[in-house]
Amino acid sequence: MSILIDTNIFLNLIRKEAAFIESSEELLKKVYEGELKGLAASIIFMEIRWVFHEKREYGKAEKAVSLIDEIVEIVPLDAEIAKEAIDLKIDRRLELLDSIHAASAIMKNATLVTRDKDLKRKVEDIVSVKTPDEILKK
């Protein structure tokens, strides 16, 4: 099974978010061990670095980027994904970065793994969307 992991799943670990850390960590462990094929949209690096730049936690940003690069295959933002993303943004009223995550999942025939309920609601009819807990139950 291929899964495209949204930025918020990595942030659960990096921020040590008590409510989510256990299932996010278990999901990423399964990816690392090869039980699941893990993908991430290339914009994940921008999002992660921006989150930590705003908090002036530059060391954490580099550590997070390195961790992500080791665990998942990065899906480049090519013309096909960009076209799909802008259509999703306009048609589904998505945030631009969310539209890129969704378009990447669609183009790679992957399940989008996110905790973003609004994103799920807006795209679940065109791409499989699950939380880490839902993936782990399978």
Image (spheres, rainbow, N blue to C red):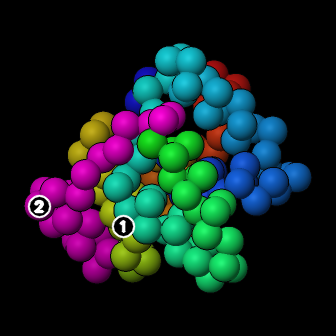
Q: Is residue 135 above or below residue 85?
A: above
User: Where is mark 1, residue-wise?
Assistant: 99
Q: Earlier in the sequence, mark 2 or mark 1?
A: 2
Q: CA distance from mark 2 to mark 1?
A: 14 Å
Q: Report crowding for label 2: few under 14, some 14 to 19, many 20 or more residues within 10 A (C-alpha).
A: few
User: Where is mark 2, residue-wise?
Assistant: 79
Residue 50 locus on image (x, y percent): 53, 75
Q: Give the magenta range.
A: 70-91
Magenta region, main secondary structure: helix
Q: Is residue 68 above or below residue 135?
A: below
Q: Residue at x 81, y 39 (%)?
A: 22
Q: Residue at x 65, y 40 (%)?
A: 132
Under circle 1, the secondary element is helix
Residue 69 locus on image (x, y percent): 45, 42
Residue 80 magenta-highlighted: yes
Q: Report crowding for label 1: few under 14, some 14 to 19, many 20 or more residues within 10 A (C-alpha).
A: many
Which three-letter amino acid code belongs to the residue tagged 1?
Ser
Relative horizontal placement of residue 110, taking residue 9 as reference (left or right): left
Choose mark 2 or mark 1, whichever is in front.
2
Q: Nearer the viewer, residue 52 or 19?
A: 52
Under circle 2, the secondary element is helix
Which three-letter amino acid code belongs to the residue tagged 2?
Ala
Classify residue 33 by image quadrant: top right
